[in-house]
Image (cartoon, rainbow, N blue to C red):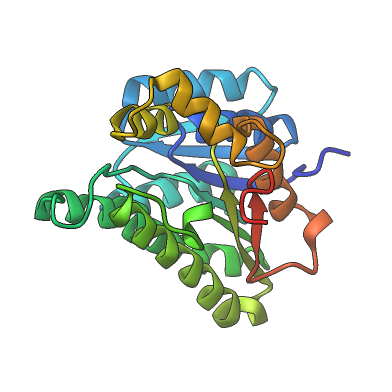
Amino acid sequence: MSKLQGRVGLLTGVATGIGRMGAQVFAREGAQLVLLDINAEEGEKTRELASSQGADVVFVHGDVSKSADVKRAVRAAVDTFGKLDLVWSNAGIGVFKTVPDTEDEELDRIIEVNLKGGFLVCKHAIPEIAKAGGGTIVLTGSINSFHAAPQWAAYCATKGGVLMLAKAMAIDHAAQNIRVNCVCPGSVDTKLQEDWLRFRESGMTYEEAVRADQASHLLDRYATPEEVSKAALFLSCDDSSFTTGSALMVDGGLSS
């Protein structure tokens, strides 16, 4: 049997990268899905890709930092599929600056998306998950939930917050049969990773910077979006039935 058969999920940050692949992996494993993203065109493409896996998939255009948009996505899951018992809060952005160089508006926005967005998704989803008899929540953290990186201060701060948010919710909602965990990737072959390396003033060419970054992982390469998605799948299915409040490192040994 598929690992998510009979489950109804809400996934955010699905327009590209990890989220786009995650929607396909979760759909392939039998989940019915509502997808939420601020990028309507690319979000709809992800819906088509996920639907091609044989699942029923709905796309909702919205901003995870806006409570009304998140509530609309949660309501779409319940109204369309009858319940909600699975969440993967994945939406995230980066600011490639030191603290003095970061504009107030940039700080506000990265907090709104990376931290407040996850907070709002859980705020509105948890009551419905409880009504369904329990379920799972996965938040996308990062190696930067634990370790800092240059010109990445605001991002590191938000990802540290995401980890603590997950741990606190795991405590608060265990009695409702809701498990909450973080998936924490190292470097992943995505546009966000490329943008960060291209921005950094490392004295290397981009190709040299990629190889140096890959070499910092024991496995000497980047993760693929599918590898991270399969880790989130593990945290979302019964294979991880005794796992909550945890951070699953998908970092190729970077933190070792």
- Residue drawn at (51%, 39%) of the image: 34
How far across and down, in percent of the image, does residue 38 sit? 31, 35
Is residue 70 visible in the rendered structure shown here? yes
Q: Is residue 83 visible?
A: no
Q: Nearer the viewer, residue 153 or 224?
A: 153
The quadrant the C terminus occupies is: bottom right
The quarter holding residue 171 reads: bottom right
For the N terminus, the image quarter is: top right
User: Which of the 4 image quadrants contains residue 132?
Assistant: bottom right
Name which residue lies at 41% across and 39% down: 36
Instruction: Look at the picture and state if 164 lies above or below 205.
Output: below
- Tell which residue pokes out farthest to the right in this image: 1
Could you say where residue 161 lies in the image, as x and y percent from the top left? 41, 67
Position in image of residue 12 (x %, y %): 45, 43
Q: Residue at the location (64% across, 39% down)?
A: 229
Left or right of 52? Residue 58 is left
Q: Residue at x 38, y 45 (%)?
A: 92
Left or right placement of residue 3 versus residue 86 in this view: right
Q: Residue furthest front?
A: 203
